[in-house]
Image: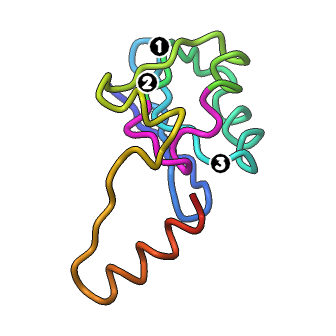
Amino acid sequence: MCRVKRIKCGNGNCYIVSQSGKAILIDTARPKYRQKILRECEGENIQLIVLTHTHMDHCQNAAFLSEKLKAPIAICKTDKELIKDNMKQPLVAKMLLGKLVLAISLSAF
């Protein structure tokens, strides 16, 4: 049976999905959560780190956790270039609230 363990990281989450003694880590959050995630991974036999996408709240700890857990990182090849420069992805909004959220998000990137 497959087990899913949620790791709450502020307003986002990472997940450990395990089955038959092997596990994958999905997303890696921001640097301030790296030790928490590492603790949650202890004893989990992480075989792979999967990044759902390259927004910084999903991938900032990928290299650190990959080194510590000795696990490779998987990401969709269409997102590969976004790791170096997340601004290569065009972001648009049409409604006023969306434009406000977009402006705040861009200032955080």
* Vertical side of 59 occupied by 65: above or below: above
Closer to the camera, 76 or 67? 76
The reply to whether callout 1 and callout 2 are in contact (CB within 8 Å) is: yes
Looking at marks 3 and 1 on the same chain, the residue that comes earlier in the sequence is marked by 1
Image quarter for residue 93?
Answer: bottom left
* Vertical side of 87 occupied by 21: above or below: above
Residue 89 in percent (x, y) is at 35, 47
Closer to the camera, 41 or 32? 32
The stretch drawn in magenta includes residue 61? yes
Q: Residues within 10 Å of mark 1 (few under 14, many from 20)?
A: few
* Amino acid type, label 2: Ser
The reply to whether callout 3 and callout 1 are in contact (CB within 8 Å) is: no
Q: Secondary structure at mark 1?
A: strand
Give me the residue at 51% from left, 44% from top.
Answer: 58
The answer for how far apart the CA atoms under marks 3 and 1 are is 24 Å
In the rendered view of the protein, which quadrant contains the N terminus? top left
Left or right, 106 with respect to 34, comes to left
The answer for how far apart the CA atoms under marks 1 and 2 are is 6 Å
Give me the residue at 44% from left, 36% from top.
Answer: 82
Residue 38 in percent (x, y) is at 71, 32
Residue stretch rendered in magenta on the structure: 51-62
Q: Which residue is mark 1?
A: 22
* Amino acid type, label 3: Arg
Looking at marks 2 and 3 on the same chain, the residue that comes earlier in the sequence is marked by 2
Left or right, 7 with respect to 31, comes to left
Q: Residues within 10 Å of mark 3 (few under 14, many from 20)?
A: some
Which label was assigned to residue 30? 3
Which label was assigned to residue 18? 2
